Image: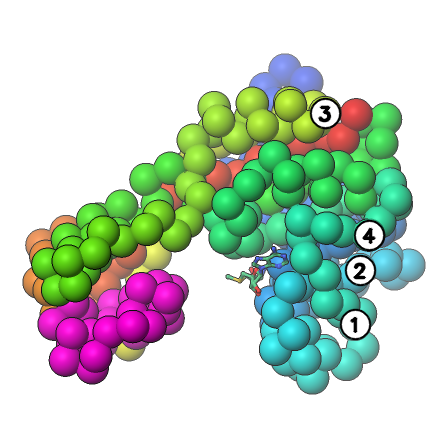
């Protein structure tokens, strides 16, 4: 499997703009594509769309997500599977994964599992994007401070946001050829107006709020809003813009 010529040339490397959707990096010739951490299958559908003969399978470790994906896309294939223990023997041309790896604490274990799922010999490709070092740093710093003040407990690190250098080294350790790994800022507007940050924090950082009373929850969310307002609230548009920073990696299993 080779990268498509309009995305990659041997003089300049990857020439695609980094705002371009991750799905566009999947070579048109890829016959088998595993969507790792597919959620409700929106990108699985894009991966399958318009490519006759391509076999696409979406897998996720959440039974609710797989159930929802099957309901929403009855013509596609979905299975329950943990990314850390994939049961495939060098059979996929592409492992694709969007917004998943930052949920996994052990990237070396994850990459061994992905490597074993991919066709070897430099032909099977990993195409992934997730939170990079510094992702949502403004929001997390405010949340750390508010939770410590409210509960007296230091908030545990919830996410694995590596630098490009760290992730490249992990790829090499797991026998990948690193074709491109980059970090980039992707400021992301949140929907819902002023309530958008509250809704995002309560969903994305759900486990931080599990043991709090409703009064404590309210105090923490209010404190986060006040602390990040100067940096992340766009008064003109009436929306929050989260300080997302992404890491995109393109690598081949050797
Ligand atoms: C933010 S969603 C991304 C969904 C989809 N890839 C997308 O971009 O729309 C993250 C997904 O990763 C899944 N996930 C987290 N850890 C996983 C693991 N160890 N194995 C498989 N899926 C996992 C979650 O269940 C969730 O559906």
Q: Is residue 63 left or right of residue 135?
A: right
Q: Nearer the viewer, residue 76 or 82?
A: 82
Q: What residue is at 67 percent from the left and 49 percent from the top?
A: 84
Whether the residues at callouts 2 and 3 have beta carbons within 8 Å, the answer is no
Cα gap from disc 2 to disc 1, whole angstroms: 8 Å
Residue 188 drawn at (x, y percent) = 34, 56
Q: Residues within 10 Å of mark 3 (few under 14, many from 20)?
A: some
In the picture, the disc for residue 87 is 4
Where residue 254 appears, as percent x and y from the top left, is 79, 25
Ligand number 1: quarter of image:
bottom right
Tag 2–tag 1 contact (CB < 8 Å): yes
Q: Does the magenta segment cover residue 213?
A: yes
Label 4 or label 1, whichever comes before in sequence order: 1
Mark number, residue 56: 2
Q: Quadrant of the N terminus?
A: top right
Give the residue number, with chain letter if any, for mark 3.
Answer: 175
- SS category of the residue bearing label 1: loop
Q: Nearer the viewer, mark 4 or mark 1?
A: 4
Q: Position of residue 163 (x, y in %)?
A: 43, 31
Q: Is residue 36 visible?
A: yes
In space, the residues marked 2 and 3 are separated at their CA atoms by 24 Å
Residue 231, placed above or below residue 45: above
Is the residue 94 above or below the residue 64 in the image?
Answer: above
Could you tell whether 247 is left or right of 201 in the image? Answer: right
Q: Which residue is mark 1?
A: 76
**Which percent across, then down, holds residue 13?**
61, 23
Dominant SS in magenta: helix
Query: Contact (CB < 8 A) between labels 3 and 4?
Result: no
Considering the numbered disc 4 on the image, is that residue within a helix, a strand or a loop? loop
């Amino acid at each position: 499997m080779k990268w498509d010529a309009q995305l990659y040339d041997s003089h300049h490397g990857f020439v695609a703009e980094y705002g371009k959707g991750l799905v566009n990096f999947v070579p048109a010739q890829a016959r088998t594509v595993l969507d790792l951490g597919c959620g409700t299958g929106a990108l699985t559908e894009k991966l399958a769309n318009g490519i006759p003969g391509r076999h696409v399978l979406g897998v996720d470790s959440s039974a609710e997500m797989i159930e929802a994906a099957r309901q929403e896309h009855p013509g596609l294939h979905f299975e329950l599977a943990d990314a850390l223990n994939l049961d495939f023997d060098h059979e996929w041309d592409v492992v694709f994964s969007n917004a998943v790896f930052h949920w996994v604490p052990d990237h070396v274990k994850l990459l061994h599992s992905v490597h074993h799922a991919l066709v070897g010999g430099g032909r099977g490709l990993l195409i992934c994007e997730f939170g990079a070092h510094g992702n949502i740093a403004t929001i997390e710093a405010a949340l750390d401070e508010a939770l410590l003040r409210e509960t007296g407990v230091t908030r545990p690190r919830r996410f694995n946001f590596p630098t490009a250098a760290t992730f490249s080294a992990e790829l090499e350790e797991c026998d990948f050829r690193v074709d491109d790994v980059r970090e980039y800022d992707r400021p992301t507007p949140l929907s819902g107006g002023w309530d958008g940050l509250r809704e995002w924090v309560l969903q994305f950082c759900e486990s931080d709020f599990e043991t709090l009373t409703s009064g404590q929850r309210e105090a923490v969310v209010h404190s986060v809003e006040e602390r990040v307002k100067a940096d992340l609230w766009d008064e003109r548009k009436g929306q929050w813009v989260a300080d997302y920073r992404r890491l995109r990696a393109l690598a081949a299993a050797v």
